[in-house]
Image (spheres, rainbow, N blue to C red):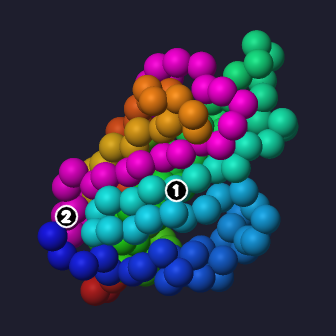
C-alpha cells in the first residue's frame, strides 16, 4: 500500500487554514489515524447533538461521515481543498449511545476526477456500527 499523500498533522493544518470556522482546537472533530485511503476520525459528544428520542441526530452523523471522506480524499490525493461531495448515502443502523462517534473511512476507488468510498460510524462503547455511508467526491482538475 502506498504511503499517504498527507499525514494527520498536515491534513489538520490544511483544514484549519481553509475551514477555520469548522475545524479549530475545541471544535470536537479529531483525526485519529491516517493511512493511504484509510482513515479514522472522531466527533466528541455534546448534549446539543441529541434529538428527540434521546439519540444523536442524523445531521451530526452525516457531518462526521462527510468529514471522514474529506480526510480520506486528502490521504490519497494530497491537498485538494476544492474537492467536493457529489453523493452521500447513509443508512442508520441502530441508535448511538450518548458518547463519542468514531468514523472509519476507506476509499474503494481513487480516479483522476472521482473518489468513491465508504464510511462506517460507531458509537464509542458499542461493537456494532450505528451507520454505514457510501460517498463520492469530485476531485478538481488542477491542470487547467
Mark 1 surroundings within 10 Å by alpha-carbon count, few (fewer than 14), some (14 through 19), many (20 or more): many
Q: Is residue 17 visible?
A: yes
Establish if 97 lies above or below 67: above
At x 37%, y 56%, the residue is 137
Give percent across and percent down for residue 28: 72, 57
Magenta-colored stretch includes residue 9: no
Q: Which residue is mark 2?
A: 111
Q: Quadrant of the C terminus?
A: bottom left
Q: Specify the label residue 70 is tagged with.
A: none
Please identify, in this view, whether the residue under mark 1 or under mark 2 is nearer the observer. 1
Q: Which residue is mark 1?
A: 41
Q: Quadrant of the N terminus?
A: bottom left
Marks 1 and 2, how far apart at CA: 23 Å
Q: Is residue 97 left or right of residue 35?
A: right
Q: Is residue 84 visible?
A: no
Q: Secondary structure at mark 2?
A: loop
At x 48%, y 38%, the residue is 121
* Chain part drawn in magenta: 89-114
Mark 2 surroundings within 10 Å by alpha-carbon count, few (fewer than 14), some (14 through 19), many (20 or more): few
Looking at the image, which is closer to me, 66 or 105? 105
Q: Is residue 118 left or right of residue 42?
A: left
Give percent across and percent down for residue 45: 73, 43
Looking at the image, which is closer to me, 69 or 99? 99
Q: Is residue 133 left or right of residue 94?
A: left
Establish if 57 lies above or below 16: above
At x 41%, y 39%, the residue is 120
Amino acid at each position: 500500500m502506498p504511503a499517504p499523500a498527507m499525514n494527520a498533522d498536515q491534513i489538520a493544518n490544511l483544514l484549519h487554514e481553509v475551514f477555520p470556522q469548522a475545524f479549530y482546537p475545541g471544535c470536537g472533530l479529531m483525526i485519529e489515524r491516517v493511512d493511504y485511503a484509510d482513515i479514522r476520525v472522531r466527533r466528541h459528544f455534546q448534549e446539543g447533538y441529541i434529538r428527540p428520542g434521546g439519540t444523536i441526530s442524523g445531521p451530526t452523523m452525516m457531518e462526521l461521515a462527510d468529514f471522514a471522506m474529506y480526510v480520506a480524499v486528502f490521504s490519497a490525493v494530497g491537498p485538494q481543498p476544492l474537492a467536493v461531495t457529489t453523493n452521500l448515502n447513509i443508512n442508520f443502523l441502530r441508535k448511538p449511545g450518548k458518547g463519542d462517534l468514531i468514523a472509519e473511512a476507506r476509499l474503494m476507488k481513487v480516479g483522476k476526477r472521482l473518489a468513491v468510498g465508504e464510511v462506517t460510524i460507531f458509537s464509542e462503547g458499542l461493537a456494532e456500527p450505528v451507520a454505514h455511508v457510501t460517498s463520492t467526491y469530485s476531485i478538481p482538475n488542477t491542470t487547467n
